[in-house]
Amino acid sequence: QVQLVESGGGLVQAGGSLRLSCAVSGRTSSFYAMGWFRQAPGKERAFVASINWSGSIANYADSVKGRFTISRDNAKNTVYLQMNSLKPEDTAVYYCNTVILSDNSRPTGSWGQGTQVTVSS
């Protein structure tokens, strides 16, 4: 089983940046494809970005393309989400999870506690 701990959220003004981290632990954690998801108040959890185990393939939701970058450091068992040019509509709780890339980055594991990102206008 894989354990996930998200961190790095906070309050930022529109146009600002944040970097989220997802610490991954457990069985062969470096071999999982990973993804970031977010859930805004009153909305369903939605896909943001995903990355394969080697870091050579990344996918993004249209709403974040060109602004967000997903990466991973397998030596540190950590997945990152660099978020630039943040907008108020990016406000949400952000979660990471293991995913199946070939199945539209479907999440497969248990959800962590997430990290809150709030973007003020």
Image (spheres, rainbow, N blue to C red):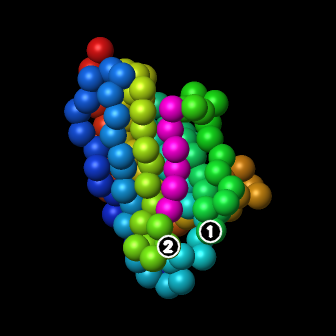
Name of the residue lying farthest toward the right: 102
Label 1 belongs to which residue? 53
Quadrant in the picture for residue 119: top left
Residue 74 numbered tag: 2
Quadrant in the picture for residue 13: top left
Q: Specify the segment rendered in magenta.
A: 67-72
State yes or no: discs 1 and 2 in contact (Cβ < 8 Å). yes
Which amino acid type corresponds to the residue marked 2 in the rendered image?
Answer: Asn
Rendered view: 23 above or below 19: below
**Mark closest to the chain's N terminus, 1 or 2:** 1
42 or 116, nearer to the observer = 116
Which amino acid type corresponds to the residue marked 1 in the rendered image?
Answer: Trp
Say whether residue 60 is magenta: no
98 or 8, nearer to the observer = 8
User: In the structure shown, which secondary structural element does the residue marked by tag 2 occupy?
Assistant: loop
Give the left or right position of residue 17, taking residue 66 as reference.
Answer: left
Q: Where is residue 62 in the image (x, y as percent from the top left)?
A: 63, 30
Q: Where is residue 46 in the image (x, y as percent from the top left)?
A: 54, 40
Please report the residue visible at 34 percent of the width from the left and 34 percent of the height from the top. 17
